[in-house]
Amino acid sequence: QRVPDLCAQSMNFLAAILLILMEEERAFWTLAGLCKGGALRGYYSGAMEGAVADQCVLKDALAAALPAVSAHLDKLGVAVPLVSTSWLLCGFVCCLRLPALLRVWDLLLYYDGSLPLVHSEHAAQPPQPP
C-alpha cells in the first residue's frame, strides 16, 4: 500500500487525534485510508479537489441555512474558503471540542464522504431533552 501522495501540515492535527484514539500503526493506516480512498480523498492531492468541492458545498449550505450571514459575508467581500479552509483541512480538530469533533468524525466515517459538512452544525449543538 502507498501513503497519500501529498502530506500537508494540517494532517498533523488528524494524526494527533488518531494517535489518541488508537495505537500507532493503526492510526497511520487509518489516516492513509482516509486521505487516499476514504472520506478525505482529494483533500491532500496536488489540486486539493476534494477540499475545493467541499468548500462549494459549505458555501451553498451556509447560503441555504443562514442566508443573512452568507449575505453579510458577501457584502464584506469575505469568501467562505478564507475562513473555512483550515476547518476542513484539519478535519475540524482546530475548531471543535473533542466530543463534537468525534460526532462529526462519526458522520464522516459513516457516510465516507462530504455529507457531514452539511450536517456538522448539528454536532456542535447540545442534545435536546426529551
Image: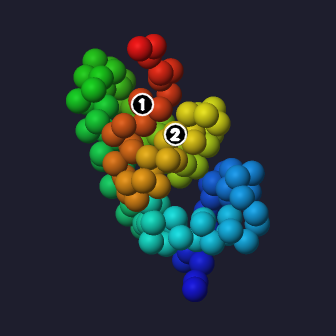
Q: Secondary structure at mark 2?
A: helix
Residue 65: image location, x then y, percent: 27, 26
Residue shown at 75% from the left, 51% from the top: 20
Depth check, front residue: 11 or 26: 26
Label 1 environment density (alpha carbons within 10 Å; few <14, some 14–19, many ≥20): few
- Residue at 72 percent across and 58 percent down: it is 22
Q: Nearer the viewer, mark 2 or mark 1?
A: 2
Residue 60 is situated, as x and y percent measured from the top left of the image, at 26, 38
- Residue under label 2, please give it: 103
* Sooner in the amino-acid sequence: mark 2 or mark 1: 2
- Disc 2 crowd, CA 10 A, few/some/many (<14, 14-19, 20+): some
Q: Position of residue 117 (x, y in %)?
A: 38, 43
Asked which quadrant contains residue 119, the reply is top left
Q: Is residue 78 visible?
A: yes
Name which residue lies at 68% across and 64% down. 27
34 or 52: nearer the viewer: 34
Q: Give amino acid for label 2.
A: Arg
